[in-house]
């Protein structure tokens, strides 16, 4: 019993945790051989002293089990192996639990980083939009134009949307459309007769949702980088839905002499699409024949 206990303790508290688990296989094999030799020697000594003190050197007087050296040795090492197996199982369970906790931490960290990146992208959009709108309002205020109160009301609606809706993960597509309409009305006041814009929607369900501020950067980009042909900026916007997809198309007049500057809006929207709808969207951008076109096919589910 003392030899069995000592050999088991050496196995489960030294050999397995210090050498086997840490993948130091060479030392594990070497020290296992040492342990085997020492324990085997002690077993032989214990049998020898059993012969001396208990049987008075009479082999026939020895306990029948003690006579069978193979049986005694096998019994000792069977206990060692069984206990060591339970130790390995316990260590594996602990390792699996630690691995699961680590994976959970990694996923939480990745989620927080993704949220921070999304917030950063949104913060880039808001100041850019407000800057253009406030500049327009300032110009109207200087002229004391009658349209100034209407512009303030539209801006108020937009700010309400930015403050209370944009931080949500999803908003109704209908709300996003109303937000776009308010933005277009503000731009109409700014451009006056120099703007020819159409915004048509088809088959818009009441329950479909998308990420907030997802479509506006395309429209904002068209107003910012669009080119006036014959003194008029032409923009066509079409938004339609099927059971599984949202189709968004926008086209604006463009100058071939103007470099293909996409602006922060399109760069941000591509990053946001990758973060929110990776593998669920198709974005096509075409710049030719004095027209800049964007086609977005989105699976919001």
Image (tube, helix red, strand yellow):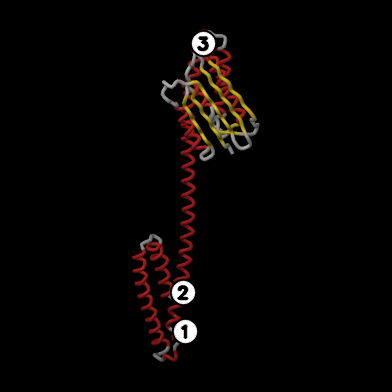
| Residue 202 in the image, given as x and y percentages of width and height | 63, 28
Select label 3 or label 1 by which is in front: 3
Badge 2 or badge 3: first in the primary sequence:
2
Q: Is residue 17 above or below residue 294?
A: below
- Residue depicted at 52% across the width and 36% down the height: 282
Badge 1 or badge 2: first in the primary sequence:
1
> SS for tag 3?
helix
Question: Badge 3 is on which residue?
Answer: 141
**With 116 as the anchor, is 34 left or right in this view?**
left
| Residue 138 in the image, given as x and y percentages of width and height | 49, 13
Residue 13: quarter of image: bottom left
Number of residue marks = 3
Select label 2 or label 3 by which is in front: 3
Q: Nearer the viewer, residue 237 or 59?
A: 237
Badge 3 or badge 1: first in the primary sequence:
1
Q: Is residue 201 above or below residue 102?
A: above
> SS for tag 1?
helix
| Residue 143 in the image, given as x and y percentages of width and height | 51, 8
Select label 1 or label 2 by which is in front: 2
Answer few, some or many: residues within 10 Å of disc 3's Cα (few below 14, many 20 plus, some between 14 and 19). some
Answer few, some or many: residues within 10 Å of disc 1's Cα (few below 14, many 20 plus, some between 14 and 19). few
Question: Badge 1 is on which residue?
Answer: 65
Mark 2 touches mark 3? (CB < 8 Å): no
Q: Quadrant of the N terminus?
A: bottom left
């Amino acid at each position: 019993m003392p030899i069995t206990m000592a050999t088991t303790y050496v196995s489960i508290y030294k050999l397995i945790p210090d050498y086997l688990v840490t993948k130091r296989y060479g030392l594990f094999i070497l020290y296992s051989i040492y342990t085997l030799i020492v324990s085997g020697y002690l077993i032989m000594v214990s049998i020898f002293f059993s012969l001396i003190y208990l049987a008075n050197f009479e082999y026939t007087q020895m306990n029948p089990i003690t006579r069978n050296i193979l049986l005694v040795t096998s019994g000792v090492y069977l206990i060692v192996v069984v206990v060591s197996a339970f130790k390995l199982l316990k260590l594996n369970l602990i390792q699996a639990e630690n691995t699961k906790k680590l994976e959970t931490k990694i996923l939480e960290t990745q989620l927080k980083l993704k949220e921070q990146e999304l917030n950063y992208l949104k913060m880039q959009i808001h100041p850019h939009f407000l800057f253009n709108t406030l500049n327009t309002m300032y110009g109207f205020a200087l002229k004391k134009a009658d349209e100034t109160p209407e512009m303030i009301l539209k801006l108020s609606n937009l700010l309400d949307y930015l403050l209370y809706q944009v931080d949500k993960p999803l908003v109704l597509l209908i709300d996003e459309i109303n937000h776009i309409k308010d933005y277009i009305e503000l731009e109409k006041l700014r451009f006056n007769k120099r703007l020819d814009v159409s915004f048509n929607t088809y088959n818009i369900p009441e329950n479909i949702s998308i990420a907030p501020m997802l479509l506006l950067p395309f429209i904002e980009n068209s107003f910012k980088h669009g080119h006036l042909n014959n003194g008029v900026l032409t923009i066509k916007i079409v938004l339609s839905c099927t059971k599984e997809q949202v189709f968004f198309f926008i086209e604006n007049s463009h100058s071939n002499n103007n470099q293909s500057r996409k602006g922060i809006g399109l760069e941000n929207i591509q990053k946001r699409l990758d973060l929110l709808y990776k593998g669920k969207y198709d974005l096509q951008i075409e710049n030719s024949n004095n027209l800049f076109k964007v086609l977005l096919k989105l699976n919001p589910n």
